[in-house]
Amino acid sequence: MVGVIQNPKDKIMFEIYKESSYSDQYRVVYFTELHEHNKEREIDRAMKGEHVFDGYILSLTKERAMKKIGDIINKLNEGKIMDPQYIDNYLEEFLVD
């Protein structure tokens, strides 16, 4: 982990999960980026799925971090097996407490 961020607005909470109801695809939801019109649906979808990994990324590096998370999602959907420690190491430069 990079370090402790004092202001919650400086970080984005996310979860990687495997969808259990439709396609069995891996997805990511950025909880703190949701808007009122999609908040309940996206949270419900994630809660019904199988948890894979969650954490916080810095807002300042969100574009790069989201790209790396997207890479993880693509690899998982291609059948690559990644445990939480591998994902943590892969995202280490972006993760914060």
Image (tube, rainbow, N blue to C red):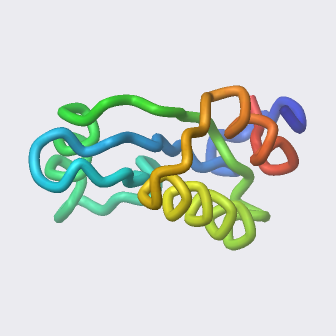
Residue 60, image quadrant: bottom right
Q: Residue 44, relative to residue 69: is it above or below?
A: above
- x%, y% of residue 59? 69, 59
Q: Residue 83, relative to residue 19: is it above or below?
A: above
Name the foreground residue: 52 vs 76. Answer: 76
Name the foreground residue: 76 vs 60. Answer: 76
Of the 4 image quadrants, the one containing the N terminus is top right
In the picture provided, is 14 more to the left or to the right than 68? left
- The residue sitting at 11% across, 52% down in the picture is 22
- The residue sitting at 72% across, 35% down in the picture is 86
- x%, y% of residue 31? 41, 47
Residue 5, image quadrant: top right
Counting every numbered tag in the picture gives: 0
- The residue sitting at 61% across, 64% down in the picture is 71
Name the foreground residue: 29 vs 53. Answer: 53
- The residue sitting at 55% across, 49% down in the picture is 80
In the picture provided, is 38 more to the left or to the right than 52? left
- x%, y% of residue 23? 18, 55
Of the 4 image quadrants, the one containing the C terminus is top right
Q: Residue 50, relative to residue 46: is it above or below?
A: above
In the picture provided, is 30 more to the left or to the right than 49? right
Residue most extreme to the front: 79
Name the foreground residue: 37 vs 85. Answer: 85
